Amino acid sequence: MTTVEHAEHVDVEESAPTAAPPEERPIGYGRLKRKEDPRFVRGKGNYVDDVLLPGMLHGAVLRSPFAHARIVSIDTSAAEAHPKVKAVITGKTLEGLGLAWMPTLSMDTQAVLATDKVRFQGQEVAFVVAEDHYAARDAVELIDIEYEPLPAVIDARRAMDADAPVIRDDKEGRTDNHIFDWEAGDPEAANAVFERADVVVRQEMLYPRVHPAPLETCGCVASMDPVEGKLTLWETCQAPHAHRTLVAMVAGIPEQKIRIVAPDIGGGFGNKVGIYPGYVCAVVGSIVTGKPVKWMEDRSENLMSTSFARDYHMTGEIAATRDGKILGIRADVLADHGAFNGTAQPTKYPAGFFHIFTGSYDIEAAHCKVTGVYTNKAPGGVAYACSFRVTEAVYLVERMVDCLANELGRDPAELRMQNLLRPEQFPYENKTGWTYDSGDYPTTLRKAMDIAGYEQLREEQRRRRAEGKPMGIGVSFFTEVVGAGARKHFDILGLGMADGCELRVHPTGKAVVRLSVQTQGQGHETTFAQIVAEELGIPPEDIQVVHGDTDQTPFGLGTYGSRSTPVSGAAAAVVARKVRDKARLIAGAMLEVSPDDLDWEKGRWFVRGDPSAGKSIQEIALAAHGTLELPEGVEGHLEATTVYNPPNLTFPYGAYICVVDVDPGTGVVKVRRFIAVDDCGTRINPMIIEGQVHGGLADGVGMALMQLIGFDEDGNCLSGSFMDYLLPTALEVPDWELGYTVTPSPHHPIGAKGIGESATVGSPPAVVNAVMDAIGVRHADMPLTPSRVWHAMHGGVGAPQ
Ligand code: MCN
Ligand code: CUN
């Protein structure tokens, strides 16, 4: 990796590199090695599959082989007769408990175990509980189901046809596959600028269906204590508190009798936001057997049945003047949500965050329409390092800007520079209602172009072209919206999205901070300790971070949409400041001066004008627990709690440049260079940020070039293993060249914005723009596999994979 850090726009000091001796280690922000890594590199992480309980049983799911079929009969007698089987659960069992259907995040309904029909291949139909995993799997094979196959709807564009089979006929009065229609922006204002424009470019594109494919698949251990009536659920999940409330609402178990524990998690990437039928089955399995039940899906189950993302058919239109000023943008989208609508749909933003599709540009008018439809595919519309539809929005606008550049014969970087929002326009309200908090876009793009050596690259491209070697340079500039956020704007399941945080400083000056969010590999144990360290001057290694256990942590809606830093990170800073304020009162009593006469420097309060007279936070902590007579109104001990309700979301952004070479004979794309300049405001741990960006860039290159969850016309999933669902390895990605700028968020206590999804969101259009630039074609859909690129080069559109 090459890190190019230009100093002129940086106002946060970077600390010493990772190998620094203890005295040089940062107390606060900086490149601190991850606290969690010693256990991971030693293989001592504790995942759900490591949970072993006395008497534990094992569950396995029977899944539908058909994408669409009526269930005629289910015969479980042979499975029940298996000597190691303890229970066989079907939809009928669940109906008796009122659990046959469960709500999705968008308050749609999803069958836990199918009773009437199966609606996608891989759908859950029955659940076996047995003494061991192998017996459970064997017994699944013994269940005899008679299906009556029905025609399947696989293409979203077919789903709205009048004669299309109705998928959700379980819903009363439903005669079509339409889920929602959603609009943003002003259609009349958009029409007006489109009429006035010199140039209008229109392009259809598909953002194909992809899967997050975390290293650890989904699963749980459910243990219902038959005496106490308390359910403990170990889950590989991103949002423990949200799951607790959901389980309470759905299963009718009192919330104080539910404990969700999310131990170490082998990646989430959005796959572990929601609840899957297997979890409900494991809970029911534990209730009916009186024993703990473990259920872990395998890789194919994970790929075929859990949350997919994208599957957006988009038509974009962009309007501009002849000299390149963008006037308006329009989008018409068909969103394929699969058989059950699983997307998180906050009430005010029903199509997720797609309506940031005006991107990073000063655009006069915008309008978009998103239509959601059901198809016979696994429940889609969920998440994959996406900031919930920002990915699709960024792809649309960044492809459209390139199409416009193509039409006008302009350089795509220069055209962007002309249209980017200017620093003085912030805070900027876009035409669909977002208020972008802060940004200096031209500086960031300039920096990326400088690192790339943009002009020389264009020169090289001309030379190579003359030799018949296709080389492409792709630019993208993205603005994300992350950190949901603001009770007045958001609710999921009727819950607001404010996050709690608790901080306790022990008598010896060590501390414990309890979070509502849940790390899946993002390094929260390190960075949240750094936030508290920065505010209090307690070394990060002295601060324990507790998360992932609802019995031990305050309420909050969890980690997704890169919201941990924007929301919970803010809460951690605020709670530390509360502790600091309390410490001031105690220091005043210790030093026998008025607290108003004290000043703070990192780690201690001292008497203004007499720095030698001071008390360290550790001394204050001891006094707070000791015999010191505390001032009137000050309680003992040194601790605080807070609930942070963010005033706005944060708007991280970045400029990416991708350089590709295309083999003219085979269509193979080689990503030769990738330059990424990100701005996530104040940087807590630059090393962790770089790791997040590296991962996201690999994801983005993968989506652009190879990842695809495909189906045949009967709805058979063609991507049920890593042999068919291709993920990039170190061989397919270049040495990333990173840079950064720092434009703090004005409304966030430490000025930080999220970074966890930026690179996944921003990189696919850079890669596609580069390939189109190389082959001189206006558009071809992802994934740009060799055959697709080859066909595009030879005039074929819609070539096979
Ligand atoms: N950070 C920082 N300075 C900033 C912003 C962030 O040092 N200005 C640090 C944070 O403290 C945190 C990490 O970077 O340790 C990511 O922070 P943030 O952007 O707040 O994102 P979240 O922690 O909320 O993580 C969620 C995000 C999402 S939604 C997906 S999807 C994704 C991603 O993170 N899934 C991941 N990155 C992942 N990385 C790993 N290893 N595994 C996943 O499943
Ligand atoms: Cu969009 S995937 Mo992340 O938000 O969990």
Image: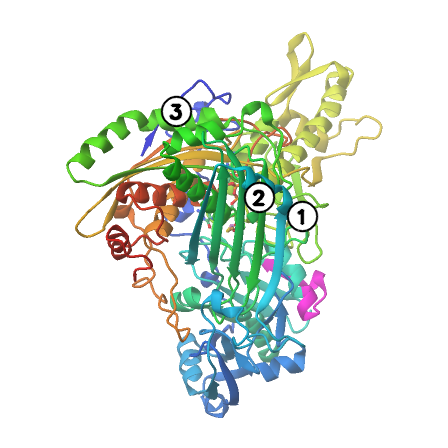
In percent of the image, x 72 and y 27: which residue is there?
A: 581
Q: Would you say residue 512 is visible in this rendering?
A: no
In this picture, residue 198 sits left or right of residue 412: right
Residue 294 placement (x, y as % from top left): 50, 70
Q: Are marks 3 and 1 in contact (CB under 8 Å)?
A: no
Taking the spot 57% from the left edge, 39% from the top edge, the residue there is 193
Q: Mark 1 CB in 8 Å range of ligand 1?
A: no
**Which element type, helix, strand or loop, lies under badge 2?**
loop
- Residue at 27% over, 53% down: 795
The residue that label 3 is drawn on is: 5
Image color mode:
rainbow
Q: Is residue 638 left or right of residue 363?
A: right
Question: Within 8 Å of ligand 1, the CB of disc 2?
Answer: yes
Which quadrant holds residue 169? bottom right
Question: Do the numbered discs 2 and 1 sit on residues whose CB atoms are within 8 Å?
Answer: yes
- Mark 3 and mark 2 in contact? Answer it, CB < 8 Å: no
Sequence-first tag of 2 and 1: 1
Upstream in sequence: badge 3 or badge 2: 3
Q: Does dot 3 land on a helix, a strand or a loop?
A: loop
- Looking at the rendered structure, the kind of residue marked 1 is Met
Determine which residue is flagged by label 2: 563
Quarter placement of the N terminus: top left
Question: Which residue has dot 1 on it?
Answer: 497
The x and y percentages for residue 201 are 45, 44
Magenta stretch in the rendered image: 248-260
Report, in whole angstroms, how far the alpha carbon at label 3 lies from the one at label 2. Answer: 26 Å
Q: For the image shown, how many numbered marks are present on the structure?
A: 3
